[in-house]
Amino acid sequence: MSRVAVWDLPTRAFHWLIVLLMPALWWTGEEHMDDLHLLLGEVALGLILFRLIWGLIGSSTARFAGFVRGPGAILDYLRGQRPAGVGHNPLGALSVLALLLLLATVAGLGLFATDEDGLAPGPLSHLVTFDSARILAERHEQVFWILVGFVGLHVAAILFYLLVKRDNLVAPMVSGARGGGEVEAGMVAAPAWRFLVAAAIAILLTWVIATRL
């Protein structure tokens, strides 16, 4: 069977780095490893910024314009009247947007949070009062657990596709390609210079947020 490109390397790297970072961030937070938790949080922030930029200028399947669809397209997909196509299907696009929104919210709240003693402040906590920073720290943790719940739903959906629909969604996120099937055309890759631009902007923004604001 012919194979078609589905996911580019930057998109796959983002996905698996976030998978690794989430338990690491939970563990460092639970064990009060504040310096490491903050460092990992800044890495996560940089990755999220990169993914948002890559969603504008990246490869065809990574771009929001390439997979975000309206209610009509989602209903047609659920009725079996619209093919899944290459990349995210119309329903899966909602899951991606929800996860990105929650990731960005957790990271954003963490920037303004501080610990009970004020000894491990987020890089932007000086912009709010101590009491506000403590409230935001609580919201940071609460939204993290909402994110964990959505990750659980995401994993459940992957298992449903694997066991019921016999469609392995994980393999393409590892290899970048899958069997062609009914898909006529695969991913259109973005040139390398766009990756360099997206990475440079994400790194610069993270550095400014973490050290200059």
Image: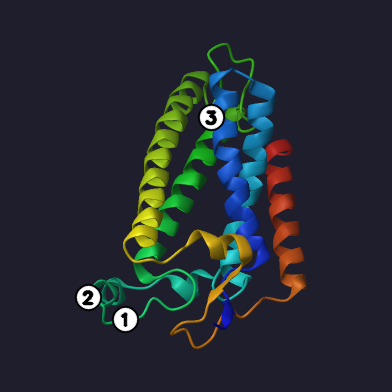
Confirm or deny contact between disc 2 and disc 3 (CB under 8 A). no
Sequence-wise first label, 1 or 3? 3
Residue that sits furthest to the bottom in the current view:
184
Quadrant location of the N terminus in the rendered image = bottom right
- Residue 157, horizontal then vertical, whole percent: 36, 55
Quarter of the image that includes the C terminus: top right
Left or right: residue 183 versus residue 31 is: left
Check contact, mark 1 vs mark 2: CB within 8 A. Answer: yes
Q: Are marks 1 and 3 in contact (CB under 8 Å)?
A: no
**Which residue, given by chain and number where applicable, does mark 2 sit on?**
79
- The local crowd at label 3, few if under 14, some if 14 to 19, many if 20 or more residues have their Cα within 10 Å, is some
In the image, is residue 18 above or below residue 136? below
Query: How many angstroms separate mark 1 from mark 2 (CA)?
Result: 8 Å
Res. 102 mark: none
Foreground of the two, 58 or 115 = 58
Picture quadrant of residue 92 = bottom left
Crowd tier of the residue under label 1, counting other residues whose Cα lies within 10 Å: few below 14, some 14–19, many 20 or above:
some
Looking at the rendered structure, the kind of residue marked 2 is Arg
Q: Secondary structure at mark 1?
A: loop
Q: What residue appears at the point 53 percent right and 40 percent down from the top-left corner?
A: 108
Would you say 204 lies left or right of 181 here? right
Looking at the image, how many numbered discs can be counted on the residues?
A: 3
- 95 over 23 or under it: above or below: below
Secondary structure of the residue carrying tag 2 is loop
The residue pinned by badge 3 equals: 26
Q: Which residue is mark 1?
A: 82
Q: Residue at x 47, y 43 (%)?
A: 105
The amino acid sitting under disc 1 is: Arg
Is residue 99 visible to the viewer in this orientation of the structure? Answer: yes
- The percent position of residue 89, horizontal first and vertical second, equals 40, 70
